[in-house]
Image (tube, rainbow, N blue to C red):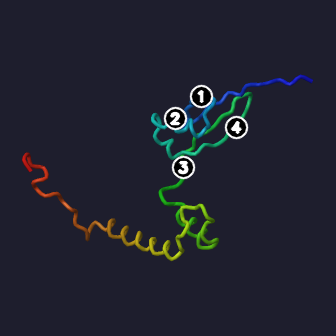
Amino acid sequence: MAIVEQTIKRVFKYNGITLQDPSPEKLPDQVRVLFAPAYPELLNAVVEGPVTKAGVSTYTFARAAGSKGVGHKSAMQKIFTDGMPNTGSPLDGVSISHIKENQKCSQIVSAVVNNRTKSTPALPVATAFSRFG
């Protein structure tokens, strides 16, 4: 029985558009970043796949689901239940009390910034836009 070598072609799909593989040496995530200038929403997309059929591997760039901050609550719950991550984490040396304190501070700042009826905008002084000021 002879071994047959088959070359698999890669294609990338995004939002119904088929994008050709710019370089077979690049990882799918590198290809995503490469196409980002033409499709800026790819910066927040995830790579799904590949699905291989008839010698073609198809990777799909899918928009990240949800909205800003969706994972915050579940991440906080994980930290509170499992404890802090092992060494090598950006959270090394941070205690749960620090996290709770920062969370409270963020809530206060958010309330102040988003309360447009009680805040006064800081306007530049008149000379900021003058010809000689």
Q: Amino acid at mark 3?
A: Ala
Q: How many marks?
A: 4
> In the rendered structure, are the residues bearing label 3 and label 4 in contact, judged by CB atoms less than 8 Å apart?
no
**Residue identifier under label 2:** 34
Which callout, 2 or 1, points at the residue further toward the start of the chain?
1
| Residue labelled with disc 3 | 64
Q: Amino acid at mark 2?
A: Leu
* Residue identified by numbered label 4: 51
Q: Secondary structure at mark 2?
A: helix
Label 1: which residue?
A: 23
Vertical side of 125 occupied by 62: above or below: above
**Distance of mark 2 from mark 1, alpha carbons?**
10 Å
Q: Position of residue 90 (x, y in %)?
A: 54, 61
Earlier in the chain: of badge 3 and badge 1, it is 1
Which of pointers 3 and 2 indicates the residue nearer the eye? Answer: 2
The structure residue drawn at horizontal position 68% and vertical position 27%, both measured from the top left corner, is 9
Q: Amino acid at mark 4?
A: Val
- Give x and y (percent) for residue 98: 48, 74
Q: How busy is the neighbourhood of tag 1: few (under 14 within 10 Å), some, or many (20 plus)?
A: few
Between disc 2 and disc 4, the foreground one is 2
- Counting residues from the start of the chain, the first of labels 3 and 4 encountered is 4
> Which mark is first along the chain, 2 or 3?
2
Residue 58 location, quadrant = top right
- Label annotation for residue 38: none
